[in-house]
Image: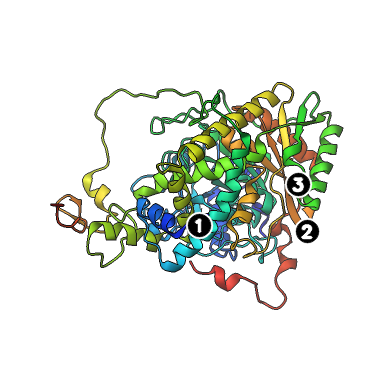
Amino acid sequence: MNEALSVTAAEAAARIRAGELDAAELWHRYRERAAADDCNAFTWVASDGDPPQVAHDAPLAGVPVAVKDLFCTEGVPSQAGSRILEGYRPPYTATCVAALAGAGAPLLAKTNQDEFAMGSSTENSAFGPTLNPWDRARVPGGSSGGSAAAVAAGSSPWAIGTDTGGSIRQPAALCGIVGLKPTYGAISRYGMIAFASSLDQCGPLTRDVTDAALLLGAMAGRDPCDSTSVGLPGPVELPGRGDLRGVRLGVPAELTGEGIEPGVLASFNATLDLARELGATVEPCRLPHSPHALSAYYLIAPAEASSNLARYDGVRYGLRADGAADLLAMYTRTRDQGFGAEVKRRIMLGTYALSSGYYDAYYGRAQKVRTLISADFKAAWERFDFIATPTAPSVAFELGAKTADPLAMYLNDACTVPMSLAGIPGISIPSGLSDGLPVGFQLAGPAFSENALLDAAFALERAIGFEAAPWRGEAAEAPADGEDPGRSEARGA
Amino acid sequence: MLSRDQVLHVARLARLELSDEEQQRMSEELSKVLDHIEKIGELGDLDDVEPTAHVTAVENALRADEPRPSLPAEVALASAPESDMGGFRVPSPGPAPA
């Protein structure tokens, strides 16, 4: 791979500013790489024309960005991984994508995802699954799997995704990169095709923690078009901390025991040892209601989704089924043809949880459990600065391994869902390899603690020294027989 | 266990047309997921717990009620499967109920 592509986005931006690297050349090289991607990471790649003009003093200096399909981008397909929005080109651009362009990160490509962000493997995309660049027979995680795979494969310098119950952190973990879910409300959701509005949050997927801080800083802020956006209390600072002296890490028994693969746990514990060496105190803690987080999440998120997805009715945009005799038949047939199996499952689950006679026992109760989960974290912050857990219970699993069992797929989110329900920030950084596949280490902090969280993650990142990446060794990893398992299936787009 | 009748009822509420095979699969899969979800019943009486609908402290976010430019009608209609006379065209909802 070309040397200019081997550096982080922050380093590339610094080189452009110093006049050592030409932004237009970087754009062309990444565009070519994205166009040649063999992981089905992209649903659209910018055409081979003139690169977008970027102001010379723009903070992101022209380093291009890949954006999850569900962000609306004016005139560019924005399909949320769904047949029901196939070919949809929105008339406006999401606030966060416009903010990135304004800061000097033009749109390189749109990335593949689970349909409407519902999934943990990117196998639920109407445009075929994304493959994990570490092992193309495995999933990249999800739902922001295209963004994670693109960064891990070196096909994009950095990317953004969305996280509702783990959809940034888990694919970042499974692809060996950094993924940050900011505090709910830090970044505008305007133009982000909605899944579960009280949980959805945009965030960066990057090669390192510094790149994540840069992207966060360019996107965070209050937006008059999203009344739930609040921004961050101050500017995002570039992390630079070298130690963890005085930092108190809590390790919740409920999220670090049963169900976590031994190799993942070993890497997690080794990282805790490094944290101690850096001066942190590491002590067990309790999040007593977190075992119920998954249940509460799988009621609240589908309930909100069933309401949000009511808008796909074949009237204003997207697919309309042919030949329906009347309006109602047009609605039901369009939705049957346009939605995939997982989306239908969640619409059904959410509609059921909200339906008369079940509301109190399901949705109402789940909202109360959400209160208890938030209270668990609030109690933890009295004794700890951050909570540490593995990001995902396993390394990347094989394509198809969990598609037949929705519950097994949902259990992937066990360590990320509690933070989502509490609306607090969480970051996943690569902590090592297990059986040759990356493991993610999650740090979570109180709401709006992004600067401190990024600083702590930066110190750990340096101590871990994780350098492995699929793009580093690509000459050696070309398949000997020219056959790539799962690839033909993945070329559906 | 979610019966086929319950599945059909919920599908009607959700405006989803499901094939016979989908109805059967949905009944099995949702029942299994609900079995897991129902573990929140183990938490017992939650009468004293306030529900959380929203996690940040924002109460109201109002802006001045002033006219602003918005999408021109032809742009808003451009993605519609069918439009006519400046509106979205849809099949007839059927005869009015007697």
Could you tell me if residue A319 is visible in this image?
Answer: no
Q: CB under 8 Å between callouts 2 and 1?
A: no
User: Which label was assigned to residue A342?
Assistant: 1
Identify the residue at the far top of this view. Answer: A382
**Relative height, residue A380 to residue A68 (above, below):** above
Q: Residue B35, position in %: x, y? A: 58, 50
Say which of A395 and B34 sits in front.
B34
Instruction: Name the front one of labels 2 and 1.
Output: 1
Q: Say left or right for A172 vs A491.
A: right
Q: Which residue in the structure is indicated by mark 2?
A: A436
Res. A471 in view: yes
Residue drawn at x 69%, y 44% as measured from the top left: A391
Q: Which chain carries label 2?
A: A
Q: Is mark 2 on a helix, strand or loop?
A: loop
In whole angstroms, how far apart are the C-alphas of marks 2 and 3? 23 Å
Find residue B43 and report its image quarter.
top right
* Dot 2 amino acid type: Gly
Asked which secondary structure carries label 1, the reply is helix
Image point (30%, 22%), residue name: B64
| Label ID, residue A258 | 3
Report the amino acid beneath label 3: Glu
Q: Going by the image, does A259 lie left or right of B74?
A: right
Asked whether disc 1 touches disc 3, contact meaning CB atoms under 8 Å apart, the reply is no
Provide the secondary structure element on which disc 3 rests.
loop
Residue that appears at 78% across and 53% down = A433
Mark 3 Cα-neighbour bin, 10 Å: few <14, some 14–19, many ≥20 = few
Q: Position of residue A303 (x, y in %)?
A: 46, 43
Amino acid type for the residue under numbered disc 1 = Glu
